[in-house]
Image (cartoon, coloured by chain):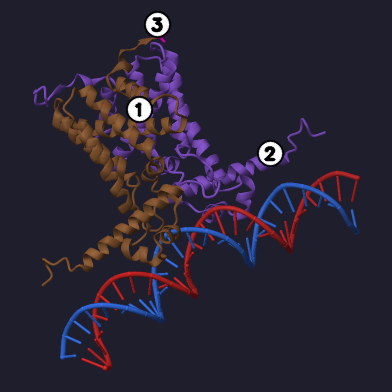
Chain colours: A brown, B purple, C red, D blue
Amino acid sequence: MDTTQPTDQQRSADRRRRELLEAADRVVLRDGPQASMNAIAAEAGITKPILYRHFGDKGGLYAALAKRHTDALLNSLRAALDAPAERRERVEVTLDTYLAAIEARPQVYRFLMHPSEGSASDRGFDVGMHSIPLLRRMGEELAQVIEDRLDLGPGSQQLARVWGHGIVGMMHAAGDWWLGERPCTRAELVRSLADLLWGRLAAAGDKMGGPGF
Amino acid sequence: MDTTQPTDQQRSADRRRRELLEAADRVVLRDGPQASMNAIAAEAGITKPILYRHFGDKGGLYAALAKRHTDALLNSLRAALDAPAERRERVEVTLDTYLAAIEARPQVYRFLMHPSEGSASDRGFDVGMHSIPLLRRMGEELAQVIEDRLDLGPGSQQLARVWGHGIVGMMHAAGDWWLGERPCTRAELVRSLADLLWGRLAAAGDKMGGPGF
DNA sequence: AGACTGCTGTTACCGCAAGTAACATGATAG
DNA sequence: CTATCATGTTACTTGCGGTAACAGCAGTCT
């Protein structure tokens, strides 16, 4: 039986798969998220049907491709979150890690955030399911960390999940905007966001002190 | 001369345009963001080229369509932001307004957040510009309100913009997740998010008090 | 040896949606 | 009666996702 034997065909197929993914990676890095299957196949030196044999459909390829980058980014973020430092320091390092990643490879970032909706397989999806997997995964991850390490009162699990997704969304939107306009340095952005999370919004005074205003 | 006269052809064209937009609205509400030009034309009782004469391309139609809803939502949010109440109250009402809107018309919401990238006109765009117009507009709007009404120290304008986009992103991501999973009531979600903005993250105690951990 | 299986690769095609060209029609102005 | 201009149509091109059918090439069973 070939239960212990990877049959060395398996390994060959896996290697092919990885080669294809790297070709796809190169194309996406060059052409952005609208990279066509033809282009990817050409880059890999083969033709379309092979891609479809390996990945089923475009969604499958994109999912496989996204998983690699998502996993990589999540590992970096986990490391930042688990650093042995003060909470504020950890938050800032994590924010900076994310922002540095999207700054370094904007095309990849753009691809990850813009799956562009599959074409026919989406039938029957309810709203909400369309959302970007990376954001969801980051949100859940952060929620777990928050719940594990913070002492919130009753309902802590739910609170942690809301905060996880909320903070990730904050990071994402601010990062996206920052990447487009570059209105300040990365360090300034990190500091501003951390300030926001640290309650400076609530602590700030009104500008025109009238109570009815 | 017909400088004072809107030439009543103009008005007729405008009415047509509005009718087409409403037809498009109906289709998008029914089919989601992947509504085809053919479908929209059919719903309006006409054929494709007319749509193209009125809106240029699909991006144009989508932009016009999005503008209507975006304006409507922004008006609601402005009203909530300008309410004569305590800051926390205003924040909660604003969050609730947004969440109620996306809860009431998820298809519209999904459309607004998922323009699916134009096809050919995107050439030459740098990264960052892809982002959803509604989010950007909400971010800028909120930034303006924050800057107008809060007394932040030096660099207040930049801080306000970061916070504006950050808070909007938080609201958006949390809302998207909530809409998909419905893990709690709207009121609970609003409260949790407001708590986050009010610095409860920073105030919470560690679970295992070891300093090195 | 010769047929069977399974994998990799190809060409050539289908269906569908965006976008366009060219033609038809009906009102209005000179 | 004709020129014009907006409104509408059919029929086409282009490009992409996806698939069917076929071609070469290992090994394998009898």
Relative depth, front residue between A54 and A155: A54
The answer to whether residue B52 is left or right of residue B82 is: right
Q: Position of residue B177 (x, y in %)?
A: 30, 39
SS class, disc 3: loop
Mark 1 belongs to chain: B
A40 sits left or right of B1 in the view: left
Question: Of the numbered discs in the image, which one, if any, rests on residue B95?
Answer: 1
Of the residues shown, which amino acid type is indicated by label 1?
A: Leu
Q: Identify the mark at residue A209; answer none if there is no mark.
A: 3
Can residue B46 be seen in the rendering of this structure? no
The residue under the point 40% across, 65% down is A46
Looking at the picture, do discs 1 and 2 lie on one chain? yes
Which callout, 1 or 2, points to the residue nearer the camera? 1
Magenta part of the protein: which range?
A207-213
User: Residue at horizontal 26%, vertical 45%?
Assistant: A71
The three-letter code of the residue at mark 3 reads: Gly
* x and y, in percent, of residue A34 in the image: 45, 51
Report the chain holding disc 3.
Answer: A
Asked whether residue A188 is in view, the answer is yes
